[in-house]
Amino acid sequence: MARPASVFTHPGTSAASPDSAIDALARQACDDAAQLNEVLQAHACIEKLIAPERTSELEEMATSRSELGALLRLANAELQRCISAVESSTSQLHDALITEETPAKPA
């Protein structure tokens, strides 16, 4: 399971510099995107279960509609969780980049 995107410090450091915060967010976004890809692969597998390439495979499949429905609900819930994680990570990364690019106003 991926780390929460709000974690900015690397293990062993007391405070995160802007660069390490951005690095942590970028790594989190990559991890979240990899998890999203895994869910996409699960959906492709479900698609193959529902619509096999050869009609003879349909006869061999002993799966009920309710079982496939349960599988799709779980896959969709995980897909939504992964999408939310990617959105959160990339939004935080965007905010951190904007903050770093904004020059400090003189006092």
Image (cartoon, rainbow, N blue to C red):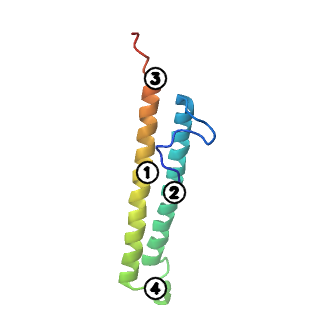
Whichever of labels 1 and 3 marks the residue nearer the N terminus, that label is: 1
Quarter assignment of residue 15: top right
Q: Residue furthest front?
A: 14
Closer to the camera in the image, 50 or 4: 4
For badge 3, the amino acid type reads: Glu
Amino acid type, label 1: Ala
Reading the chain from its start, which is encountered first: label 2 or label 1?
2
**Pointer 4 residue:** 58
Binning the other alpha carbons within 10 Å of mark 2 as few (below 14), some (14 to 19) or many (20 upward) gives: many
The earlier-in-sequence mark between 4 and 1 is: 4
Q: Residue at x 43, y 85 (%)?
A: 63
Is residue 51 visible in this depiction of the protein?
A: no
Q: Are marks 2 and 3 in contact (CB under 8 Å)?
A: no
- The secondary element bearing badge 4 is classed as helix
Residue 78 vertical placement versus 49 (above, below): above
Q: Read off the residue under disc 2.
A: 35
Mark in front: 2 vs 1: 1
**Alpha-carbon neighbours of circle 3 within 10 Å: few (<14), some, or many (≥20)?**
few
Which picture quadrant has residue 10?
A: top right
User: Could you tell me residue 47's position as x and y percent?
Assistant: 44, 71
Residue that label 1 marks: 85
Mark 2 or mark 4: which is in front? 2
- Inter-mark Cα distance, 2 to 4: 30 Å
Q: Earlier in the sequence, mark 2 or mark 4?
A: 2
| Tag 3 residue | 101
Q: Decide if residue 46 is on the left or right side of residue 27.
A: left
First of labels 2, 3 by sequence position: 2
Comparing 47 with 37, the one in front is 37
x, y percent for residue 102: 42, 21
